[in-house]
Amino acid sequence: MGLAVETRASLALEREHRYVGQLSVSQCARLVAELVAGADTALQVELQADRRSGWPRLHGRIVGALMLECRRCGRPFEQALELAVDLRLVFGEAEERAALAKAEPLLIEDDRLPLWQVVEDEVLLALPMLPRCQSCENVVNEAAATAARPQEQQAPAPRDNPFAALKRHLQSKE
C-alpha cells in the first residue's frame, strides 16, 4: 500500500491519523539525484499525528536500504536506513522560531501536511555527506587511527648531547 502524498494537518491531528505504507524512491526527485542511477527501492514508512505530548507532532519511523555510490572507489553499495522521525507541527513563523530551541519544527502552511516531502527531507538529512563503501571506510578509519597514534609509540630520533656538540664546536675554533 502506498503512502498518501499529503493530508490536512488539522484533520490528521484531530483524528490522530496513522500513516503506514511504502514510498518508492523514484517518486522523490531530490533523493533520486543522490542515488545510483536506476536503483529503485521502496521505503517503509510509519507516521503518527497526535497531540499526546502536549503539542502537535508527527512522529514515527522510516526503514529501507538505498544504493549509493562510494565517493572513494566509485562502486555502488547498499546503505541501510532506519530513521526515527519526531517533528513538532507549528502553524506560524513565530511559533517555528520559538520551537527551534526545543524540537525540530515543521511549518504547516495552508493546513497541508506533505507526507512525501517530510519523508524525502528526513532521508536526505540522514545520508552521509561523503558516502563510502565498507571497505573504503575501513581504509580511511585505519589511516586516521595511524595518524592519531601518540608520538612516543614511534621510535625517537637519536639526539646529540648538547654539551658534546658545544665541546666539538669550541674545539673546532681552536
Image (cartoon, rainbow, N blue to C red):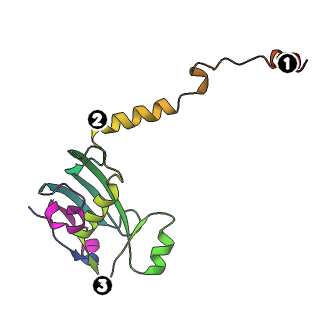
Of labels 2 and 1, earlier in sequence is: 2
| Crowd rating for badge 3 (residues with CA inside 10 Å; few <14, some 14–19, many 20+) | few
**From this viewpoint, which residue is outermost toward the left?**
1
User: Quick check: 21 left or right of 152?
Assistant: left
Residue 4 horizontal/vertical position (percent): 15, 70
Please name whichever residue, 109 or 58, is drawn nearer the observer in this view of the structure. Answer: 109
| Cα distance between the residues tagged 2 and 3 | 47 Å
Quarter holding residue 103: bottom left
Please name whichever residue, 131 or 174, is drawn nearer the observer in this view of the structure. Answer: 174
**Mark 3 secondary-structure assignment:** loop
What are the residue bounds of the magenta stretch? 12-36
User: Quick check: 29 left or right of 71?
Assistant: left
**Mark 2 secondary-structure assignment:** helix
Q: Which mark is residue 172?
A: 1
Q: Are marks 3 and 1 in contact (CB under 8 Å)?
A: no
Q: Badge 3 is on which residue? A: 110
Regarding residue 112, the answer to whether it shows in the image is yes
Q: Badge 2 is on which residue? A: 135
| Looking at the image, residue 107 lies above or below residue 57 | below
Say which amino acid is labelled 2: Ser
Which mark is nearer the camera, 2 or 1?
A: 1
Residue 21 within the segment the image draws in magenta: yes
Of labels 3 and 1, earlier in sequence is: 3
Please name whichever residue, 11 or 109, is drawn nearer the observer in this view of the structure. Answer: 109
